[in-house]
Image (cartoon, helix red, strand yellow):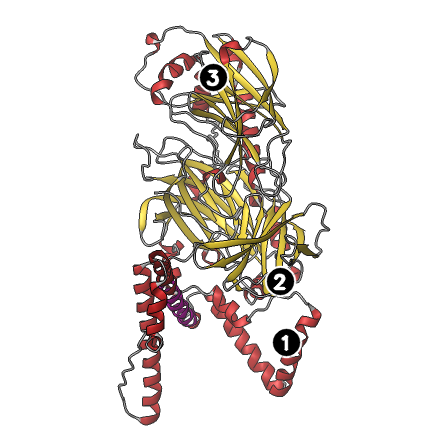
Amino acid sequence: MSLRNIGGGTGLTKLVDSSDWPSQESVTHSPCEEQNISNSTDEMDQVLRLRDTRIPSSESFAEKPHYNRNDSDTFSIHDNKHNSILDMRTETAGVCEHQREPQRTYLLTICLKEGRGLVIRDRCGTSDPYVKFKLDGKTLYKSKVVYKNLNPFWNESFSFPIRNLDQKLFIKVYDRDLTSDDFMGSHGVVLNTLELEKTSEMVLPLDDPNSLEDDMGVIVIDITLSVRDGKNKKHLNKGSTIEHNRRLTESMKKSQLWTGVYTITLVEGRDLPLDGQGDVFVRFKLGDQKYKSKSQVKKVNTLWREKFDFNQFPNGSSILEIEVVGKEGRKCEECYGQCEINLSGLPLNQSTLFTSELDPGRGKLVFLVSPTPCTGASITDLVAPPLEEPHERENMLVKYSFKNSLKDMRDVGFLQVKVIKATDLMAADLNGKSDPFCVLELGNNRLQTHTIYKTLNPEWNKVFTFPVKDIHEVLEVTVFDEDGDKAPDFLGKVVLPLLSIRNSQQVACPLRKENLGGLSKGTIVLELEVIYNSVKASIRTFTPREQKFLEDNAKFSKKVLSRNVVRVRNLYRAVCHVNQFIKSCFQWESVQRSIIAFMDTMELNEEEDEDEKESERKGLMEKIHMVQEIVITVQNLLEGIACFGERIKNTFNWSVPFLSNLAFLVLIMATVITYFIPVRYIILLWGIHKFTKKLRNPYAIENNEVMDFLSRVPSDVQMAQYTELSSCSLHSPVKRKRASP
């Protein structure tokens, strides 16, 4: 089962895009494992002999760090700065050492340096190029994406063992796109023409037989073909292997960790074209992070007033791409215009106003960008968690103490997650094993572990930390199976509200299905700790909640619709019961009343004749889409009504003690204030505040504090989906210490 498409992050976006998942071999340092790694080069001949029958093609999920794996082969990665090569061996069975025949093997080492004069594939006059190296139909390596550049610079190296030189290595260049990647040309290199033990720089002109372009640019590489014999195979020792693994882990960290946040406020569109009925919305894109605004009715001056955050990565793109799109019906979309903004160099902690012109005569877009530095995101090994560093815990407790309640209101808290291991996972591969890796999501922030291959009981032993912006967020921990070029397969998921975390307690949580409706196979062992400021968290409760970039588009589901009808009916019965009880208290009698709610579209009878004539002129698919939109609207309306009632109920039955205590405290404060201050003065002050809000802050986001509070209260469905930490089995501290050598 593949990941579903979701509407960031970390980009955001589609969580399921196969290019959004980096892969990496597991790194272990036990003596037995180090011995296996150091001895792996002795079995290269055996591995290469089996490669033709057992190798599945594989390439990375991301453009940033890339690691290649073969089912019965070795792989190696070369580092430019340290000139070291790491060979890692996977399982091979059924071949004895005395059966191996001595045969010469080679090592192909390639450094992808740069591209020059590449072709344009994007409408903005540039391209987002990356390179694939293919041999015998299999992808050996895939480079990172260089955004908005026709002369990209990569400086990436890798190595691969070669047995047969009568092959052709293909270098193919693609333009990264939202849907399908565009081909930018290729070049082939015949391996038996290379000179042994010599590094050669090659300038490879790109070509595409199906393209009319004469000059498609060139790719510059350094290539070396060396002989692998018994002497030079054993040049790797344990120290260099461990050091190289450490550098690979550091590379993975840099590709995921963000150092700043761009807060973007979409204000309005001015002088937009009016070409018929429909809606208009805005798409934002920064690297791999994507955001789609709410749809508004087409107007000359359209107001949005939306705020969202994009993370700033050290080596990420700083070009913000904006597209204004008009939509009429379900499928028809028209681009009103595009613009690009370079976010590098903007002043920190200050809002910069942009009034960007779209295509000539197509209007303008007004928005603000505020860059702020961000700390708190990290990835470390289990042996050195951040909160166990000297004085680090004390510093965090001071930072989020009561005396610092009015400093940096956006920084509410700090979350540390130890991802230790998973047990008894589902087998996703034909060999009865899986290649699991784990993804952690907190709001729109996402981090992930490395991949451990061919196991149902992986041990990651990693520690992740997140900055907390809203204590009412939930941590989603999802386990996937890496599946080569395809989207990863879903194995299980756990959803944990931050307010339910019991600090420093190791728990084994059962994995759930993708829709969180039932249990999946396997458990995951976690240890969580959250530190936060209660005053900041309380104030944040009455502000608009951040929307996830990756939320699903609404789809019709008979099961969801029937569930929402039952929820609304139960709420209606509860209201009627309360009303009946109150009446019986005053009238000293019990009068049963039945009210039947007709949910049919009663007003359609008057216009039935007109609708029938109009529907005859419409195609079948358009009518189906129209009916589907109506059903989805009804389904979402029922869900909204049910959630609203259930959240009010859960507030008063103390389902979330923090929120119930907060509501109780607000009611007490309101009672005290109204006792000492006349109500007319309170209403006067409230009116002055509301009427002068736009004058004091012209670009303020309108919000309703009561609705913002209720949005934090979980509904009955959400509470059923959350994992109860009290029901998870506990692991003793002794086991935890043993897991941290």
Q: What residue type is labelled 2?
A: Glu
Quadrant where the image shows the N terminus: top left
Residue 647, magenta (yes or no): yes
> What is the three-letter code of the residue carrying label 3?
Lys
Image position of 300 (left or right of 522): right
User: As displayed, is residue 191 above or below residue 364?
Assistant: above
Which residue is the site of mark 2? 268
Task: Please state the extent of the stretch shown in magenta in the rendering.
Answer: 631-649
Disc 2 and disc 3 in contact, CB within 8 angstroms: no
The answer to whether residue 693 is magenta is no
Please state the horizontal and vertical placement of residue 459, each as a whole percent of the image.
Answer: 42, 36
Q: What residue type is labelled 1?
A: Lys
Residue 560 visible: yes
Q: Mark 1 points at which residue?
A: 690
> What is the x, y in percent for residue 186?
52, 25
Residue, far bottom: 587
Which of the two labelled residues, at mark 2 and mark 3, occupies the earlier sequence position?
A: 3
Q: Residue at 49% across / 54% down in the picture? A: 333
Q: Distance between the residues labelled 1 and 2?
A: 21 Å
Residue plotted at (43% across, 29% down): 58
Disc 2 versus disc 3: distance between alpha carbons?
Answer: 55 Å
Which numbered dot is residue 168?
Answer: 3
Secondary structure at badge 2 equals strand
